[in-house]
Amino acid sequence: MKINKTLFLHISMVVLAVLVLTLPPFINSLQPALTFQPLIKTMEGTRKVQAEKVATISHALDGNAIFFLGASEVSTSENEHFAVYNFFNTKLHQPTVAYGDSYVDNMTQLALLTRFKQNLSPKTKLVLLLAPDSFYFNGIPPTIFADHFPDTIFKPLMSDKTMRPILTHYLTHIDAQDVDHLTFRQMRIFGWNHNIVWREIKYQFSSFCELIRDYYLSLSHIRHSELQPWPILNKSWHKIDWNVQLQQARQLNRARHESAATLWMDKEVFDDDKTADEWYSTPPSLQEMQAFDDMMKLLHERKVNVVVIIDPLNPWALKHTDKFAKTDHNIQLILQKYDTPYFDMYSQKYQEGWNWDRLHPTEVAWVAMDRYIAEAFNK
């Protein structure tokens, strides 16, 4: 009996010590500091990291920054001088927050904006970057879904009449073999699979341990957090000589060694695949087009100051890019229905050097986008 009491006392002390150690990081995660993050690729991260991302996006959409929403065109341009979140922040001193990564489709964009719809207003300065080929996606892969829909995003969406059926349909039509992890809230819809449940337990435990580790490393000054204060909003900027910017972009592009011989792709990309591809033999997704219409309707109802850019496709490196013309026309009809200004680079005569591969923009293409955005918001 005495041994049992001693063991119980030791266990109680261990539990108490754990609680004492874990409580401060947990409380700290509930009150995230407002930090400036020029690029957010996903909503992945610890509870604290997610809260900081939510705070950044909310503050940006409240009119304190230009919010640029795209897909892989955003995340692959970190080193591009003229990428909007680089150029506007450093050259124009105009706070700009960009969000985007691979397979961020119309459903994902609609979901993100719906999650933050209380922040959407006439003060919001929003840029949507679209690509005609994204309307052919048949839902995003479950691993990508997990990156963008943790409970901080997913939970509020399930009470939204537009998003609930979309997310429910998605979760009931994915294969368990493709799932990396789902939250327990999402498993209520998807179903309870032993392997997925166990993976989520391990994922949440790992995330919580990371939260505690980061807190104490920062507290002990072993790891210095590189938090950026929110920059002062520059309400107007001086006139820019866009011809000079374009010349600089072309100079930067020379290092890519693009030419007709490389199908106007970077030489390194061309060396990996020297043939033109043909994308999507299937018709465009009706769900993607409906999600886009719902998104533009939401922005119109909230009177958001929004402009849309349609990304160019490289007709040298892709076969039959004209097949996307009908989809592009339907995009334009929706934008016109909601009286939304847009810059359609796909429908224009292709400028050699606009893409470094088949889709993603180069410095030269970014200058064209920067100019359109600057002229749209600097009035």
Image (tube, helix red, strand yellow):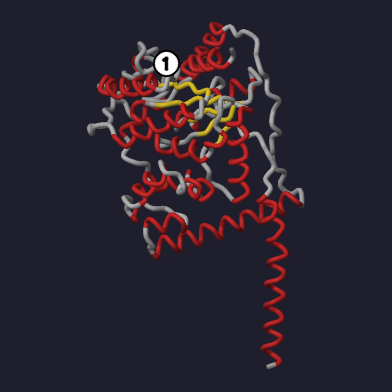
Secondary structure of the residue carrying tag 1 is loop
Would you say 221 lies left or right of 370 here?
right
| Residue 266 in sight in this render | no
Residue 175 spot, x, y in % from top left: 32, 53
The one nearer the camera, 109 or 246, is 109
Q: Position of residue 286 (x, y in %)?
A: 29, 34
Left or right, 23 with respect to 342, comes to right
Left or right of 221, for residue 363: left
Estimate the x, y position of residue 310 in percent, counting from the top left.
Answer: 40, 21
Mark 1: give few (<14), some (14-19) or many (20+) Cα within 10 Å: many
Q: Height in image: 205 above or below 329? A: below
- The residue pinned by badge 1 equals 353
Q: Quadrant of the N terminus?
A: bottom right
Q: Is residue 202 above or below residue 352?
A: below
Specify the farthest residue to the bottom: 1
Q: How many marks?
A: 1
Q: Quadrant of the C terminus?
A: top right
Looking at the image, which residue sits at the far right?
Answer: 220
Q: Residue at x 55, y 27 (%)?
A: 79
Q: Give x and y (percent) for residue 325.
A: 28, 20
Q: Residue 49: tell me if it is visible.
A: yes
Residue situated in front as seen by the camera: 245 or 57: 57
Residue at image x 62%, y 8%?
Answer: 239
Q: Residue at x 63, y 49 (%)?
A: 48
Amino acid, disc 1: Gly
Instruction: Look at the picture and state if 75 lies above or below 332.
Output: below
